[in-house]
Image: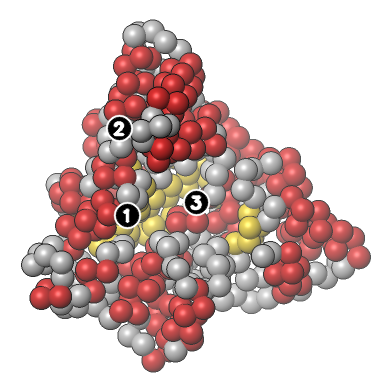
Amino acid sequence: MAAPDLSEAPYPQVFSQHMDPRKIAAACLVEGRAVADPSAPFRYVDFGCGVGFTLLLLAQAFPWASFIGIDYNAAHIQRAQRDAETLRLTNLSFRHASFADLTPTDLGSIDFAVANGIHSWVDDATRADLWQAVQAALAPDGVFQLGFNTAAGWAQLAPYQALIADAIELGLPAEQAIQSILVQFSRHTAQDQPRLSQRLAALFQHDPDYLLHEFATNSWRPTSVSALSAEAATYGLTYVAPYYSPQTAQPEDGRLLPIDDRQFWEDYYNTRAQRGYRWALFQRAAQTESSTKPLDPGALQIRRMLGGHISDPSSLKGWLQRGAAHQHSEAARLIDSKRSLFLHTARQPEATCADAVHVQLDYLAQAAPARPVLVLPQTGLLLPCPVALQQQIKRMLRTDTAMTDAAIITVFNQSSP
């Protein structure tokens, strides 16, 4: 029995903050790369967009930009189109297509291209179609963000993924294979390998549809930064960011090993930190390479912030406040140190945000995403908005028809730990 056709399987409705073009642009700028300014008009394409939840939020936050979502699952596209109409979005469109069907004419000149969770789950032919579609349509200073499973982070779980895929091919229903094997091995390893047991058990906290895509495919292929960089090079693209390893900010004689290859140090970092999922940013190889000189420690702080791994937000906030005189202040301008979702773009305040907030709250109540996010229309802030906060804002709207973003932020700060 062949593995199930996951092209028609549903995927969870989730928001990925790393797909925000402000984060992507800041990650490029901190490495000295030219990139589109997200505060000006730009074109953004999501390859494998699922139900388009992230695009729905970004299209609201950037009304001056053009967004396209592409997915091979017809049900995903139908829902995404319906939700875009509900949210009254005119700068977002969705297309039901395979990567092989796409042409540069279809896509235009892309400033920001993203593919989240695609590369690690599809076969070699589909990977090649993805690279070719991006390479053909990427603008000269365009950037392609690719999410992928790391070989280092998944090494411990790889045997179980292979076992599940084999069980499905031998005739066991996918849901049963995933449930049975993960549960059984979580119990078997509880005494001798408690951390592995906990990791296997923790997988059940994920959406069942995600587990289906992760474990029920024979095309599953984690990789490394070095291998992915080599793969991209065959399509004329080069890895430009992000660099999280502290070793890249050290002079060669101060590193743990006398190696000057930055991709090597990213793989070293992933292996040491056991990071299971990474984002990689690629640009055309023709663009001038970044300097190989040791980077300012402040740049490393921004990198960690962009990756959501900053351990001391207060120290980073102080550093960013001094960023006006810093060589990387253009990157710092695009991010906010308080919370990783607090990314903003300067715009002219509207008279009121009440109507736009009403529309979003109605949509969130109907769609019920696992991690709801509210886009504040006057500032473009992406605000985590659990149900309790949604209800509180609704009560405020009944009496304050001229509500501003500032009022919502005040409520958020009072309700957040």
Please report the residue visible at 17 percent of the width from the left and 57 percent of the height from the top.
264
Q: Closer to the camera, 162 or 201? A: 201
Q: Which mark is residue 107?
A: none
Residue holding disc 1: 273
Residue 107, how many percent across, how many down? 38, 47
For numbered disc 3, what is the local secondary structure? loop
CA separation in Å, label 1 and label 2: 17 Å
CA separation in Å, label 3 and label 1: 21 Å
Q: Which marked residue is nearer to the observer: mark 3 or mark 2?
A: 2
Amino acid residing under circle 3? Ser
Residue holding disc 3: 16
Q: Which marked residue is nearer to the observer: mark 3 or mark 1?
A: 1
For numbered disc 1, what is the local secondary structure? helix
Which of the marked residues, 1 or 2, is nearer the chain's N terminus? 2
Amino acid residing under circle 1? Ala
Is residue 221 at least partly visible in the picture? yes
Which of the marked residues, 3 or 1, is nearer the chain's N terminus? 3
Residue 130, how many percent across, how many down? 30, 40
Check whether the beta carbons of the residues at disc 3 and disc 2 lie within 8 A of each other: no
Residue holding disc 2: 158
Q: Within 10 Å of the Cα at label 3, are there few (<14), some (14-19), or many (20+) other Cα atoms?
A: few
- Quarter of the figure that contains the C terminus: bottom right
Locate residue 330: give its quadrant: bottom left
Q: Quick check: 138 left or right of 177? A: left
